[in-house]
């Protein structure tokens, strides 16, 4: 069944489906009516010759230049051709799917003045899986994602390797409406969010498994501790850890006469750190969902009054700030996971064989996988530097403050991949530690998680080629396989399409 645009908002679950599977999209009947009404307003203004930005004027610093009626179609074509100046590797199909869907959904609101056939052309590209080649670099996230969206619009003009077989001739304002908007930044941000969610779920399970492998205490997850502080994310994560660990034989084995008073912070403070990261995930998800359903081109058409108003909805500061917050959460989740790996391989802290392997010396075990995790955690620290604090004026200082949202969002996927690899190494290390605790068993839920890891990678009884094992478990992490252990925790898992 098709998702209808222009009736209800797209949920995060809908948007995840679009990124992963590309379900069919169609316009709701009311969207068709709204689009037609908006286009008629633009037609009326173009016919009257009343100077209106984006319809019969130049763009940016050239907005004072009047354009003759016979040149209006060429004006719209020229803005697409001249603005298609992106560079770099092309965006992947999942992101382009989202960009097409978000642009069509925005235009379907009937505030952009484009014709129905133009929106239908975008949907044709999407539904026929004709994904335009969009270079990843070249947008500063204000006046929208001009360069990448221009590359998208080229396909409607019949330009490029992927394009419509019957090119469109753009009507007044349509080129500008296609280029203005935050859809590329938002699509990149959503892709990063979904990857972060998959990684976060796995990191939560890995953290619980590591705690049991290290014979740690579940006392720090007592709800009374977290209620006194009051942070919702912390309270929820403490409950999730307690649930995952409930029924562990390993835990029962050291309830009494354990000489250790407190565990290291990477075990004990998981609710505090992961709860804070969860709240950042949820904040970012809320911003991205609002933006995905918003109208962010300029100027905007108001059919009830026939007015066309210039504003600045194309400025992607909300996306930039939320992407920066999400970047820090991704980095912190990976950093905490790396610290638990370091703990597990240190026999003085974990009580397990050094480097989690028997016959140390002959075997190096998890020595270098921890080094890999440290390298990835360090890389993420650099990538987490906020992009939104930078601004370089463009367009001869007409666009004198920009958001840098596109890069803020684009780096999220790389960061999530780094953290997913760290978490994969931790899952391998924690599973190894659980095996060394036999015949004692971990909790029923964590036994299932342990079995999931072991379904792909066997116990390390001696050194072997390690990289394929990391790749195998990272694939589990990135496929979202660990959401089953944490139902309804993360934003796109709690909404319905």
Image: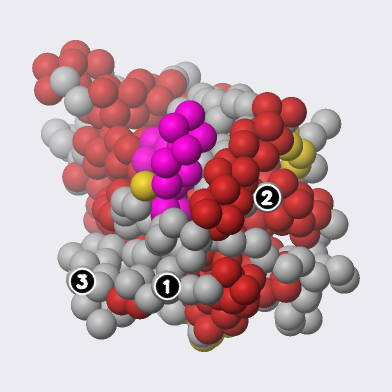
Residue 470 sits inside the magenta stretch? no
The one of 206 and 66 positioned closer to us in this rendering: 66
Report the residue at 73% width, 68% height from top: 169
Q: Position of residue 469 (x, y in %)?
A: 62, 65
Report the residue at 87% width, 70% height from top: 165
Element assignment for label 2? loop
Q: State how far apart marks 1 and 2 are (Cα).
A: 23 Å
Classify 430 as above or below 379: above
Q: State how far apart marks 3 and 2 are (Cα).
A: 32 Å
Element assignment for label 3? loop
Classify 294 as above or below 80: above
Question: Which residue in the structure is indicated by mark 1?
Answer: 66
Residue 115's mark? 2
Q: Position of residue 211 (x, y in %)?
A: 36, 40
The quarter of the displayed image where residue 23 is located: top right
Question: Which residue in the structure is indicated by mark 3?
Answer: 400
Residue, far front? 48
Q: Tell me which label, 3 or 2, sits earlier in the chain.
A: 2
Residue 59 seen in render: yes
Report the residue at 77% width, 76% height from top: 158
Residue segment shown in magenta: 285-308
Q: Is residue 130 left or right of residue 464?
A: right
Classify 138 as above or below 341: below
Residue 292 sits inside the magenta stretch? yes
Element assignment for label 1? loop
Classify 165 as above or below 437: below
């Amino acid at each position: 069944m098709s998702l209808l645009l222009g009736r209800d908002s797209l949920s995060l679950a809908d948007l995840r489906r679009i990124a992963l599977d590309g379900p069919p999209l169609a316009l709701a009947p009311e969207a068709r009516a709204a689009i037609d009404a908006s286009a008629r307003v633009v037609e009326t203004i173009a016919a009257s010759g009343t100077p209106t930005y984006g319809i019969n004027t130049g763009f940016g610093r050239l907005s004072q230049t009047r354009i003759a009626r016979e040149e209006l179609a060429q004006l719209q074509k020229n803005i697409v051709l001249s603005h298609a100046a992106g560079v770099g590797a092309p965006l992947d199909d999942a992101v382009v799917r989202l960009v097409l869907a978000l642009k069509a959904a925005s235009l379907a609101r009937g505030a952009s003045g484009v014709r129905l056939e133009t929106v239908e052309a975008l949907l044709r590209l999407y539904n026929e899986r004709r994904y335009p080649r969009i270079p990843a670099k070249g947008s500063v996230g204000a006046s929208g994602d001009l360069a990448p969206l221009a590359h998208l619009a080229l396909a409607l003009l019949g330009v490029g390797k992927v394009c419509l077989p019957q090119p469109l001739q753009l009507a007044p304002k349509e080129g500008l409406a296609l280029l203005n908007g935050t859809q590329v930044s938002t699509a990149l941000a959503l892709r990063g969010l979904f990857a972060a969610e998959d990684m976060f779920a796995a990191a939560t399970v890995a953290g619980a498994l590591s705690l049991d492998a290290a014979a740690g205490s579940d006392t720090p997850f007592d709800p009374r501790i977290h209620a006194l502080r009051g942070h919702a994310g912390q309270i929820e994560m403490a409950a999730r850890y307690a649930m995952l660990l409930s029924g562990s034989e390993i835990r029962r084995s050291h309830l009494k006469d354990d000489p250790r008073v407190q565990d290291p912070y990477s075990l004990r403070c998981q609710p505090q750190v992961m709860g804070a990261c969860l709240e950042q995930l949820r904040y970012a998800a809320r911003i991205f969902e609002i933006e995905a359903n918003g109208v962010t081109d300029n100027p905007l058409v108001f059919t009830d009054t026939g007015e066309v108003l210039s504003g600045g909805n194309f400025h992607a500061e909300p996306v930039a700030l939320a992407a920066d917050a999400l970047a820090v959460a991704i980095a912190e989740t990976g950093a905490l996971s790396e610290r638990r790996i370091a703990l597990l391989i240190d026999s003085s802290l974990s009580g397990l064989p050094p480097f989690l392997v028997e016959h140390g010396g002959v075997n190096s075990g998890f020595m270098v996988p921890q080094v890999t995790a440290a390298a990835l955690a360090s890389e993420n620290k650099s990538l987490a530097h906020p992009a939104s604090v930078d601004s370089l004026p463009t367009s001869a200082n007409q666009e004198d403050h920009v958001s840098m949202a596109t890069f803020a969002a684009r780096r999220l996927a790389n960061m999530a991949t780094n953290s997913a690899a760290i978490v994969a190494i931790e899952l391998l290390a924690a599973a190894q530690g659980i095996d060394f605790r036999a015949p004692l068993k971990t909790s029923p839920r964590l036994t299932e998680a342990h079995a999931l890891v072991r379904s792909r990678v066997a116990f390390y009884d001696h050194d072997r080629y390690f990289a394929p094992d990391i790749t195998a478990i990272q694939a589990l992490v990135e496929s979202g396989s660990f959401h089953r252990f944490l139902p309804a925790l993360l934003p796109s898992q709690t909404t319905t399409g």
